[in-house]
Image: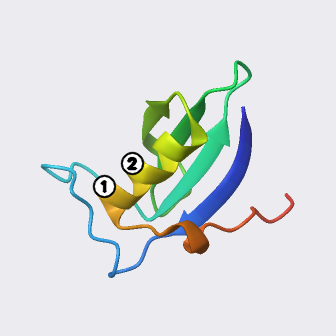
Amino acid sequence: MIVLYEVQLRARHPSTLQPPAYAVTALQLAQADHGTYYILHLDAQQQIVGDSWHATLQSALDHAHEMFGVNGEEWMRPAPR
C-alpha cells in the first residue's frame, strides 16, 4: 500500500463517526496494490485506528469530505520518511 496524500485534522473537521470511539487526528489516503483506495484514520501517535475501503479515488475523497469535512485542496503529499 502506498500513501498518496495526508491531512491533519483540526477543529474545523468535525467527525460524523458515532460514537467517536477514538480521537482521529489525521487521515491518510492510500492506494492498495490492486488499485483500490483506503482512507486510514490515525490517532495522535500516528497509529492506524480505523480505515475505510473505496473502489475509486473520487469515492475516497468524497468519503473524507462527508465524514470529516476535508476538502480536496487540503490533502498534501506526505513528507519523505
Is residue 40 visible from the viewing direction of this image? Answer: no
Amino acid found under the numbered disc labelled 1 = Met
The residue indicated by pointer 2 is 63
Q: Residue at x 53, y 27 (%)?
A: 55
Is residue 4 visible from the viewing direction of this image? Answer: yes
Q: Residue at x 54, y 37 (%)?
A: 38
Contact (CB < 8 A) between labels 1 and 2?
Answer: yes
Q: In the rendered image of this protein, does residue 49 appear above or below residue 44?
A: above
Residue 65 vs residue 80, the one in the foreground: 65
Tell me the distance, in whole angstroms, between the alpha carbons under discs 1 and 2: 6 Å
* Rendered image: mark on residue 49: none
* Rendered image: mark on residue 67: 1
- Crowd around label 2: few <14 · some 14–19 · many ≥20 (10 Å): some
Residue 49: where, in percent of width, then height? 42, 43
Residue 70: where, in percent of width, then height? 44, 67
Amino acid found under the numbered disc labelled 2 = His
SS type, badge 2: helix
64 relative to 1 in the view: left or right: left
Picture quarter with the C terminus: bottom right
Picture quarter with the N terminus: top right
Residue 66 vs residue 52, the one in the foreground: 66
SS type, badge 1: helix
Q: Residue at x 68, y 28 (%)?
A: 32
Residue 66: where, in percent of width, then height? 31, 56
6 relative to 13 in the view: left or right: right
- In the picture as drawn, the residue positioned furthest to the right comes out as 80
Q: Residue at x 26, y 61 (%)?
A: 15
